[in-house]
Image: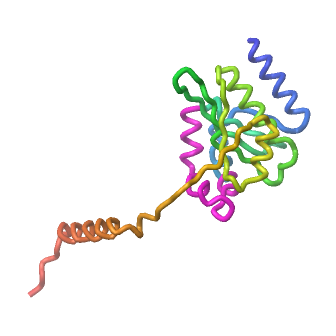
Amino acid sequence: MESDQTNQLTSSQAHTSGVIIREMGIDDIAPVFHLGEALFTSDLYPNLYRTWDEWEVIGQYNTDPEYCLVAEVDHQVAGFVLGTVFNKATWVYGYIIWLGVSPQFQRRGVADKLVDKIVERMIEEGVRIMLVDTDPANTPAIKFFTRKGFSNPRKHVYLSMNLSKHEFYGRLIAYERDKAERVRPRRPRRM
């Protein structure tokens, strides 16, 4: 009962500024996916673009629904945060996996409210350390998370390899093509 009153208070406080933070529902999956698709584009964030897909949203919604939050403004999805909690040894970690705000709702406190709410939920779950990562070139995100209390930034080197250019890939494709040719039913020849 006490948590219901707390949730009502938090929702009403968020509502006074026009931003409502709530748990993501099943009807939010598509809008959240499409917002992420618009935000995490290959020209801005090539690594994020390759990892953002509908399964990011569906998977988090299925495994950690309490850490899938939506910001709503005027009955529109204005932003979202997807997170998780995990244990390593005796520590409990919280991790903000995805945070996105629609450009039309930026600079209105939407990201602040989303992060504040997920941090609050994680504290209630016994989380001791929160983690978040972003591209080192994403200066606005680094400034935002630093302002929210995250610290100790580290640069992360991310390497990739296009396997279609690897010699084994070509041999495997040729092998599979030959195998398919051997198995393909042949029509009898007309005489």
- Dominant secondary structure of the magenta stretch? helix
Q: Quadrant of the C terminus?
A: bottom left
The extreme top residue here reads 1
In percent of width and height, residue 66 lies at 64, 29
In percent of width and height, residue 41 lies at 66, 60
Residue range corresponding to the magenta coloring: 35-64
Q: Residue 15 versus residue 170: which sits nearer the camera?
A: 170
Q: Is residue 147 above or below residue 163?
A: above
The extreme bottom residue here reads 191
Q: Residue 9 versus residue 67: which sits nearer the camera?
A: 67
Q: Quadrant of the N terminus?
A: top right
In percent of width and height, residue 98 lies at 66, 44
Lateral position of residue 147 relative to residue 136, left or right = right
**In this orientation, does residue 25 appear?**
no
In percent of width and height, residue 79 lies at 75, 44
Name the residue rendered at 71%, 56% in the picture. Answer: 137
Name the residue rendered at 67%, 32% in the picture. Answer: 130
Name the residue rendered at 71%, 42% in the picture. Answer: 80
Lateral position of residue 93 relative to residue 137, left or right = left
The extreme right residue here reads 16
- Quarter-of-image position of residue 147: top right
Q: Is residue 137 above or below residue 175?
A: above
Q: How many numbered marks have been drawn onto this rendered protein structure?
A: 0
- Quarter-of-image position of residue 184: bottom left
- According to the image, what is the colour scheme of the structure? rainbow
Q: Is residue 24 above or below residue 92?
A: below
Residue 60 on the magenta span: yes
Name the residue rendered at 65%, 55% in the picture. Answer: 37
Residue 82 on the magenta span: no
**In this orientation, does residue 137 appear?**
yes
